[in-house]
Amino acid sequence: MALEHAILVSLLEQPGSGYELARRFERSIGRFWTATHQQIYRVLRRMETDGWVTAEEIGQDGRPDKRRYSAAAAGRAVLTSWLREPVRPETVRHELAVKIRGAAFDDAAGRAALIAEVERYRADHEATLNSYLAGERRDFPDAGELDAGRRLQHVVLRGGVAYERMVLDWLGDVLETLHGLGR
Amino acid sequence: MALEHAILVSLLEQPGSGYELARRFERSIGRFWTATHQQIYRVLRRMETDGWVTAEEIGQDGRPDKRRYSAAAAGRAVLTSWLREPVRPETVRHELAVKIRGAAFDDAAGRAALIAEVERYRADHEATLNSYLAGERRDFPDAGELDAGRRLQHVVLRGGVAYERMVLDWLGDVLETLHGLGR
DNA sequence: GATTGCTATGCAACTCGTTGCATAGCAGGA
DNA sequence: TCCTGCTATGCAACGAGTTGCATAGCAATC
């Protein structure tokens, strides 16, 4: 029910095709709202039918035509009314936490495998943090003098940075704990 | 595909009925893996069919019978083999972040409503943090002298505490940013 | 010259998760 | 006395999300 809204925000920030939206979801928006291209295409067609977005056919040679979507007035109205609704509590799905508690019921070999997995996982999050920081340096070099939209994008990005830093700290704690069990 | 595993962990920690599991998911496990009672009952029946758990009918007077489930050897084997699989990257769904970016396309009244909403949301997270800290004081009063299972539960709880603290800090940043736009 | 990878869209089938509703007896408060 | 709320389980319908596959031409690499 809320993918529509994430798409509307993205299209208001900048119009684009389904494919381009899928790219953006992999990079920027997708850091806090994941979606596959399948979902995006399906929802875009429904939104067009409902008049929330408009599409413009763009012929390209050498590759398939694309449909460039823009948010329509009706879509913007839907978005602003959604913004006034209460935020629903996040539904958390943290697989690693389940595995950590599960490690109590596995043997030493299993715990060793989990340690390796946690290290790989930590490397992923380190890479994510670095990509956030690189994006921040690129897009927000000087703190002041930004319009409202940019400042809001920046505060969301800072949230991503804070999240990744917290995860990295915690994973250090997890690794210490797992190593401590072996002794 | 992983609710089964969360249930197995919970049943290995302590056997219980579907209803009791639903309660635990609201409190402990559910902090990092949410599930409704409907899902839990459905999955439990499938797991019983597959021989992952065993059920014991317990008649009670004055209220409906309950089925007390325990993890079976086959279930434990499923769990340990799952523990050795790579952790899949989390799929994040952070509605508030979408709303914050969406606020760029709303007017001053909309932003004021969002500020109120963020404050309510912050109060929720403050309550969650306090309940974690209370649980920590209750269940882990002294740091050493714990068995493996308890130490792993504790490190997961510390992750929850770190997450909530990070969120609260970030929400402070968000509120400052939102107020800054009005000026 | 063959393979891989990128842009760009889409179908079909499936699983997962949510919502609303139903039952049913007991306990406690207004 | 009525109403709300708790224990305890479940059906039915729907909506959301995933996975596998397909097309199709161009660009770059090996």
Image (spheres, coloured by chain):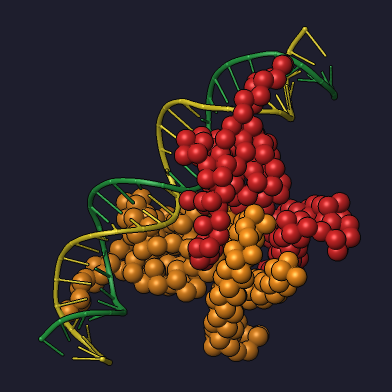
Chain colours: A red, B orange, C yellow, D green
Q: Which quadrant is home to the C terminus of chain A?
A: bottom right
Note whether residue A156 is visible. Answer: yes
Q: Residue A100 appears at what percent x and percent y?
A: 60, 65
Residue D24: % across, % down: 63, 14
A77 vs A112: above or below = above
Snapshot quadrant of residue D10: bottom left
* Residue depicted at 51% across the width and 36% down the height: A48
- Between A115 and B19, the one lying in front of the other is B19
Q: Report the side of A129 relative to B122 (left or right).
A: right
Position of residue C28 in the picture relative to residue A164 (left or right) = left
> Residue drawn at (50%, 39%), measured in percent from left and top?
A51
Side (left or right) of A37 relative to B59: right
The answer to whether residue B80 is left or right of residue B167 is left
Residue drawn where x is 57% and y is 78% of the image: B123
Residue A175 seen by the camera: no
Q: In x, y percent, where is residue B170?
A: 70, 70
Image quadrant of residue A99? bottom right
Q: In this rendered view, identify the residue nearer to me: D11 or C2.
A: D11
Q: Position of residue A149 (x, y in %)?
A: 73, 56
Q: Which residue lies furthest to the right in this view?
A: A142
Residue B179 placement: quadrant: bottom right
The image shows residue B42, relative to residue A42, as above or below, that is below
Of A54 and A16, the residue lying toward us: A54
Residue at coordinates 57% horizontally, 49% vertically from top-left? A76
